[in-house]
Image (spheres, coloured by chain):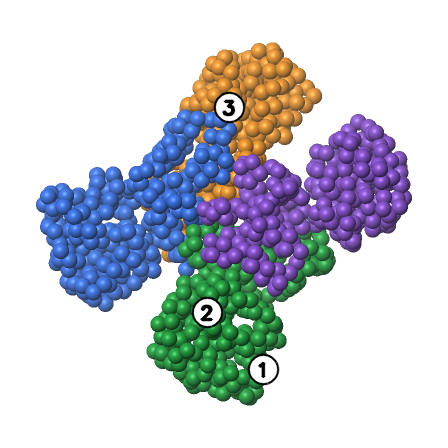
Chain colours: A blue, B orange, C green, D purple
């Protein structure tokens, strides 16, 4: 397929690399152009403008937040203006439900197609093409982009025909992960102050009831207390919990655990945690307990 | 081994059965004596009094709460008075850290040995001998009761030489499970009100990041909304979160997520939820959102 | 003074009436024009457009939320376009800190003056001219509008020369009031379920430590359980707590009690509480406790 | 009246002094006997034992917590053993609802009378005889101790004929005060980080909607950041919120704001706040926000 790819951060670079590896004709764009160099060396075409990345069958966007997606899509010379009729915008970024709904309407008006396809997985997983993809949109669009989803992920899940539904699932998934971080943070503050070795404790948890990767990954970071370099930075986690809460407000669903998580992120950021991995909120329970 | 077993509830019956199956000489005691009948049919000896269950190498207690353990151990004609010197009390109940410390001291004074050995697993797991056992105590005591632990569980983890440490781990483990229930409850209230099928949602979660039994078990109960009969009743979950918070107070560890959980249990119990499974707190987020 | 007044809701009608009573030349505007009738009978001039209300020395806006203020000020034929140079926009609405900052900049660019003057008090207090006014802005602007503030309030407090500071104070004040409602709600659920008469309880509180009007007013509503008609409707309280939290996010201040309040409002609104007074959140603690 | 007085802490000393001033025949007892010296100089009789303080018409206890009251009343040679039939135990300490119920039963069994009479007010208020007294018990007992209550307080409120009801009111009152501290703490962290002077802010609050002493007293302490010496120490506040929550659990009333308060106290105590005034929890919001 002829594919444009916009957004070459930690995640996007790995994803675009896997599209290349799968043999697609990939044109890459990033605002800071030098980030495209390694992919160009591996055979990607360099797009000088967003428009240059919108000449194929589909364009994938993998950007940091709503604002970046809005500028990329709605800006002068943006995706909306340049993508051919029938071509498909595959939005992999973690964005708000509201923006996903707006994109659905805008692309429909422009005669383009839109698939919402947020992903689960950290940068190393993206590099390995092992992401899990949540996808929602019109069946024909989803069928058309199947080769893209196959290249970037180990498995795709079709949520529904309504694009924003994939965003609901993605946001709730990040909430569930952050909940694990908080729960582990409190549990480790508790056993740690009680005199138990945190690594041994984690080993027990993850070889019994909590033998899921999410417990191993985040439990390990909290037990070691090492939060740099960030694979997923605290401001991004903060943003996602905010989007979850915003969507919850619109749905009129009180989410008290999500409130607690947001306060943890706010506290972390108020103390200079911008560059830390989001799992650093897992140390705040110990800090409140007078340990650190 | 010659073993006494006190407490034949949902969990204890399965555990004692597995001691029998492993070929041990088991004498069983329960306050309501008829509960011993099925085990007696399978070869257990019936103890008419607590003292009758204290004539072997070890006595296992598996009781509902601190009060039941206190009455059994410290009551007139209780375990403390009757257990031979050097014999071992294996306490499998989920009890307070404070009581575990008291038992440690009492048995030492009486020349008896004490191993704290709380377990993870619901009644069906206990019946299959597949519990996970957290054990702490003097190495000689733990070595001596290894055949018991092997019979009731799939694996034992030695936490430390200090009995109460196993209780800290057990209480924190139940907290982690209840945290999963709350997080799933909020996530399902959110996606459910957003129009997504809860069963499909759970299927996705548990085939990706959250492929641990705890998510499957409790997510299934919440998605189906079926909380009777209770495998682990709400008042027990409420009690355990209370014990976790009490221990946290003594350690001076604020545990905000545990507070949220306790309020969920209180709300459930205030609305007549005594007979429901503890996972019924996972429906309260939907109730607050006006769904039910 | 020649004054325009925009926004004739429960609050604005009383405020405009007091400007008339003080002898000012008042031109009133409301989107639903019939609301102006009683004031016109009392001597006010009727403005057919926003522009008609912008021909004097100052224009006061008293509107429901940010959106209404934005449309009124920034819309085609809005305040910004029509207010004469040097004339003053007095913004009494409870709006976001961000909008107050934007208004400050916009009016400065247009050569107009801006005073932020949010008020404390319910409709009956507004009708009596007994509001408390928080005012911030350039000293010359504040001095110029002193006759307006004197007419609508019993006392004005100059916060600072920076308009948004008055909004910070106003939002925090509404948070403090809502905190009183929540605290009374929990206390009354507690003593009520304990068998104590709520009215007698409130009488004791307000004749001892809590002899402030805010306890009497809201305690009385909660004790009686009468929340209609709304003097200040739940959606407005919800909005204000949201603005407080938004400003807190921007300032990086975690506000856990405010989160609790927002969840109370969300729960109330999820159960159809749109038309109730905001103090109806004070009944949710009792509801959680299985009462009422 | 011939009155015994047990417990000469910051509060008790002032209260006993006012009994003397009112002309009563007062015998004082304190475990650390030297604390009785100033009162003895003013005419009180010194009791060498608890029994010595139990020879009059009534004995007043003003002690730190449940344990102290239990030891004093139920200990060998305690109040229960020594108080004459028909004589009245006036319990002014802030104790648990459960202990108040136990005292009610015990004194009835012993043919003694019991009035629960917890008080509101800090030590300076106690010294001035200006406490507010919440009293509950049999009408004849309350009538008999009226001269005592008149001497120690500016006003007494008869809650009901059931002693524990006065304790419910007292505990809920301390919860309401702590809620004010928390709300002020969050509001001041908010406006403070927004650049507004905290003293000016408090001045505005307390001259408008929040003109109650509780806002002035605690707001002043938070604005100044001066928490030593403690008039009411943090461990006592922590204890009282714990008693409120315990009673709430027994009544099945979830109290989320009280949970937040308890976590504030736990955090304070985990950081060495034992000697600070309980209002020091009002600084924790600012600390979470990265200030102070």
Identify the disc placed on residue C22: 1
Q: Residue at x 44, y 62 (%)?
A: C97
Subunit that carries the residue with mark 1? C
Work out which residue is located at the far front of the displayed protein and give it. C140
Q: Position of residue A51 (x, y in %)?
A: 15, 60
| Disc 2, SS | loop
Q: Residue at x 47, y 36 (%)?
A: A286
Few, some or many C-alpha atoms within 10 Å of disc 1 (few <14, some 14-19, many ≥20)? some
Left or right of residue A159, residue C232 in this image = right
| Disc 1, SS | loop
Subunit that carries the residue with mark 2? C
Q: Earlier in the sequence, mark 2 or mark 1?
A: 1
Of C182 and B175, nearer the camera is C182
Q: How many marks?
A: 3
Q: Of circles 2 and 3, which is in front?
A: 2
In which quadrant of the rendered image does the C terminus of chain C lie? Answer: bottom right
Relative height, residue A275 to residue A137 (above, below): above
Of B5 and A133, nearer the camera is A133
Q: Position of residue A92 (x, y in %)?
A: 25, 51
Subunit that carries the residue with mark 3? B
Identify the disc placed on residue A249: none
Examine the image and state in which quarter residue C212 appears. bottom right
Of D124 and A201, nearer the camera is D124
Q: Position of residue B41 (x, y in %)?
A: 54, 21
Residue B257 showing in the rendered view:
yes
Q: Mark 2 — residue?
A: C138
Q: Mark 3 — residue?
A: B117
């Amino acid at each position: 397929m002829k594919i444009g790819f916009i957004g070459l951060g930690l995640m996007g670079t790995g994803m675009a690399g896997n599209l290349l590896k799968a043999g697609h004709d990939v044109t890459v764009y990033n605002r800071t152009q030098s980030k495209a160099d390694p992919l160009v060396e591996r055979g990607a075409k360099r797009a000088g403008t967003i428009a240059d990345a919108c000449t194929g069958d589909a364009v994938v966007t993998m950007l940091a937040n709503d604002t970046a997606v809005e500028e990329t899509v709605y800006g002068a010379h943006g995706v909306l203006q340049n993508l051919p009729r029938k071509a498909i915008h595959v939005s992999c970024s973690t964005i708000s439900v509201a923006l996903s709904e707006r994109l659905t309407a805008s692309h429909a008006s422009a005669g383009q197609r839109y698939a919402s396809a947020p992903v689960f997985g950290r940068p190393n997983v993206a590099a390995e093409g092992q992401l899990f993809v949540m996808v929602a949109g019109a069946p024909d669009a989803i069928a058309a982009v199947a080769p893209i989803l196959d290249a970037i992920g180990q498995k795709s899940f079709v949520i529904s025909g309504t694009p924003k539904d994939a965003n609901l699932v993605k946001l709730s998934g990040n909430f569930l992960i952050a909940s694990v971080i908080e729960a582990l943070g409190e549990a480790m503050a508790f056993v740690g102050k009680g005199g138990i070795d945190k690594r041994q404790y984690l080993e027990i948890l993850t070889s019994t009831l909590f033998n899921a990767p999410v417990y191993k990954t985040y439990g390990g970071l909290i037990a070691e207390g090492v939060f740099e370099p960030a694979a997923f930075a605290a401001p991004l986690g903060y943003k996602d919990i905010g989007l979850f809460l915003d969507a919850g407000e619109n749905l009129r669903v009180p989410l008290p655990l999500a409130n607690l998580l947001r306060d943890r992120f706010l506290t972390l950021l108020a103390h200079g945690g911008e560059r830390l991995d989001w799992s650093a909120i897992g140390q705040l329970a110990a800090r409140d307990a007078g340990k650190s």
